[in-house]
Amino acid sequence: MLNQSTTMYAPSNTATRERAARTSRRDRAAWDADALAAVWEGQHDAVDERLAVIEQATHALVEGRLDADLTDSAQRAAHMLAGSLGMFGFGDASAAAVSVEFALSRPTPDRAAELSALLADIRRDIERPVLTAAGPLSECELEPRLRASIDPDQQA
């Protein structure tokens, strides 16, 4: 009788384990999403500082007083923005930061308008909400590698 009972409940136990595993992945993804959003909130000052360095370099470029130190600082800021913004799912802002870094590799006064436009693009993109657990992960705008790290079952 014990064997029948065990056999009878095995499919249910398997289904329960599978359901628990799916729930666990969703809970973990929701926690990761909330944690990611909290980390992003803590990064606002650093992002603003990096954008300010690039803006300072842009103004100096227009005024003809951009020196090598400020250029290097602005390029480093753009490089760091490209990586961090991409990690938080701001793909357009990350791409714009890469373009800023490139534009600063050959800073000429005619690039000032391009730099200003790219900065505006970055600011516009980062104004939207970062990932939250409010919706399904499939609706979030995450880079594929980040999505895969949150939910390993998702294909990159």
Image: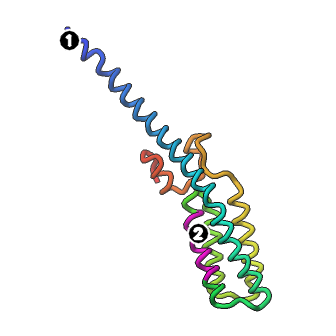
Above or below, 80 relative to 19? below
How packed mark 2 is, by other alpha carbons closer than 10 Å (few <14, some 14-19, many 20 or more), is: many
Magenta segment: 73-85
Q: Label 2's element?
A: helix
Q: Earlier in the sequence, mark 2 or mark 1?
A: 1
Distance between the alpha carbons at the discs numbered 2 and 1: 62 Å
Q: Residue 36 appears at what percent x and percent y? A: 55, 51
Position of residue 123 in the picture relative to residue 14 (left or right):
right
Give the number of callouts: 2
Above or below, 122 relative to 3? below
Q: Residue at x 60, y 73 (%)?
A: 98
The quadrant where residue 107 appears: bottom right
Which of the pair 42/62 is nearer the observer? Answer: 42
Amino acid of disc 2: Ala
Residue that mark 1 sits on? 2
The quadrant where residue 78 appears: bottom right
Q: Residue 90 appears at what percent x and percent y? A: 62, 59
Above or below, 146 relative to 70? above
Q: Residue 130 appears at what percent x and percent y? A: 63, 52
The quadrant where residue 117 appears: bottom right
Q: Residue at x 30, y 17 (%)?
A: 9
Position of residue 125 in the picture relative to residue 10 (left or right):
right
Taking the magenta stretch, the answer to whether it contains residue 75 is yes
Position of residue 62 in the picture relative to residue 131 (left or right):
right
Figure quadrant of the N terminus: top left
Q: Residue 94 appears at what percent x and percent y? A: 61, 66
Residue that mark 2 sits on? 82
Which disc, if any, is residue 70?
Answer: none
Magenta highlight: main SS: helix
Q: Residue at x 58, y 78 (%)?
A: 76
Amino acid of disc 1: Leu
